[in-house]
Image (cartoon, rainbow, N blue to C red):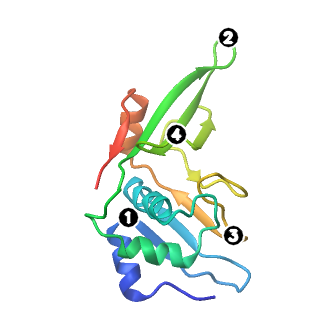
């Protein structure tokens, strides 16, 4: 499997995206993104018109080259909603989307003490699908999680 070059890896790291090389031939890379990294990745997909297509190394390389002043870049918004499920229970719904787009990435989970571990959903997704063996983890900082739980939306700008 091809890998991300040293320069692209450095630029991705600067943008909040890290890519680890697979250990076996049938594995894809493990990709970890901060909320800033997710903003860069989703903008790359949006600007390239690749919504719904499988994530590829080429997409990651394009994210490493995307200019801070590219026309059409959008901020990323994260919003946490509390949904009453049973009489005394609440579930949480995290909406993640680029401003100006409808929320298409939703995470549903029970209330937790710390920031939940979020992975990009496997299979088909209107934003991006994952190839077999690929893993994309989304990392929320404790501060971001605290803000979301306090009822604030997070807006990640360039």
Which image quadrant: the N terminus? bottom right
Mark positioned earlier in the residue sequence (2 or 3): 2
Callout 2–callout 1 Cβ contact below 8 Å: no
Q: Is residue 4 above or below residue 43?
A: below
Q: Residues within 10 Å of mark 4 (few under 14, many from 20)?
A: few
Query: Upstream in the sequence, badge 1 or badge 4?
Result: 1
In front of the other: 94 or 23 = 94
Q: Nearer the viewer, residue 112 or 55?
A: 55
- Number of the label disc, if any, that sits on residue 131: 3
Mark nearer the N terminus (4 vs 2): 2
- Please name the residue that numbered disc 4 is placed on: 102
Which residue is nearer to you in this view: 31 or 62?
62
Left/right placement of residue 37 relative to residue 2 reads: left
Q: Is residue 143 visible?
A: no
x and y percentages locating residue 68 in the rendered image: 27, 65
Report if the CB atoms under discs 1 and 4 are less than 8 Å apart. Answer: no
Nearer to us of marks 2 and 3 is 3
Which quadrant of the rendered structure holds the C terminus?
bottom left
Of badges 1 and 3, the one in the foreground is: 3
* Count of numbered circles on the image: 4
Disc 2 marks which residue? 87
Task: Work out how far the residue at label 2 is from the one at label 1, CA to CA, in angstroms.
Answer: 40 Å
Query: Which of marks 4 and 3 precedes in the sequence?
Result: 4
- The relative height of residue 149 versus residue 41 in the rendered view (above or below) is above
Helix, strand or loop for disc 2: loop
Residue located 48% across and 84% down the image = 4
Please state the horizontal and vertical placement of residue 124, each as a whole percent of the image. 71, 56
Instruction: Using the numbered discs, state the Cα–Cα distance from disc 1 to disc 3 in whole angstroms.
Output: 21 Å
Q: Which residue is mark 1?
A: 16
Q: Earlier along the polypeptide chain: callout 2 or callout 1?
A: 1
């Amino acid at each position: 499997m091809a890998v991300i070059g040293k320069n692209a890896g450095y630029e991705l790291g600067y943008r909040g995206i890290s890519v680890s090389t697979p250990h076996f031939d049938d594995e894809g890379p493990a990709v970890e993104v901060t909320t800033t990294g997710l903003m860069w990745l989703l903008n790359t997909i949006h600007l390239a018109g690749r919504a719904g297509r499988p994530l590829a190394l080429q997409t990651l390389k394009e994210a490493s080259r995307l200019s801070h002043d590219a026309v059409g870049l959008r901020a990323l918004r994260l919003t946490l909603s509390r949904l009453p499920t049973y009489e005394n229970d609440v579930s949480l719904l995290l909406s993640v989307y680029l401003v100006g787009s409808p929320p298409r990435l939703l995470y549903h989970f029970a209330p937790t003490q710390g920031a939940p571990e979020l992975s990009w959903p496997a299979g088909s997704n209107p934003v991006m699908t994952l190839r077999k063996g690929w893993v994309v983890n989304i990392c929320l900082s404790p501060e971001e999680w605290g803000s979301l739980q306090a009822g604030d939306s997070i807006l990640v700008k360039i």
